[in-house]
Amino acid sequence: MMNTEKEKLLTDDINGGVKVKLICSEHLLSVSEQDYMEKIRELHERLDMVKKIVRPGCSDDVLNTALSYLSSLATILSHMPQKLHASL
């Protein structure tokens, strides 16, 4: 892939090193793709916020609440039909 003036490569660091690359050129992302990428960014922002709040030295209540909600979320997501996972 060659970089030209019309084509700029943007990277967004997600989850400590995994790079998502968006190419801005004549081919623009569809509205649904833009919405999807915005939701992914929002998810990572919220996960980062949890990481900042739940640190060594935080109260037991904060730690237990975070663990409970994340455990519930993981359980719900793991029970979603595989068809939904594949479409994303």
Image (cartoon, helix red, strand yellow):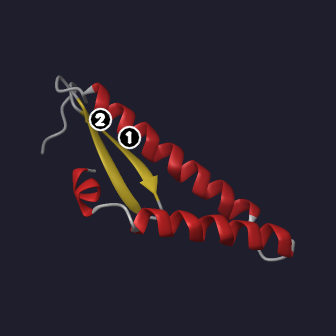
Q: Is residue 45 visible?
A: yes
Which one is nearer the viewer's eye here, 35 or 55?
A: 35
Amino acid at circle 1: Met
Q: Is residue 34 left or right of residue 29?
A: right
Amino acid at circle 2: Glu
Instruction: Name which residue lies at 29% across and 35% down.
Output: 33
Badge 1 vs badge 2, beta-carbon distance below 8 Å: yes
Instruction: Name which residue lies at 17% across and 27% down.
Output: 27
Disc assigned to residue 37? 1
Which one is nearer the viewer's eye here, 51 or 84?
A: 84
Q: CA distance from mark 1 to mark 2?
A: 6 Å
Quadrant location, the N terminus: top left
Instruction: Name which residue lies at 74% across and 67% down.
Output: 65
Would you name the residue on which mark 2 appears? 33
What secondary structure is found at the residue carrying circle 1?
Answer: helix
Quadrant in the rendering for residue 9: top left
Q: Position of residue 69 (x, y in %)?
A: 64, 64
Q: Is residue 47 left or right of residue 8?
A: right
Query: Is 47 located above or below residue 66 in the figure?
Result: above
Q: Is residue 58 visible?
A: no
Which one is nearer the viewer's eye here, 55 or 74?
A: 74
Query: Is 51 located above or below residue 46 in the figure?
Result: below
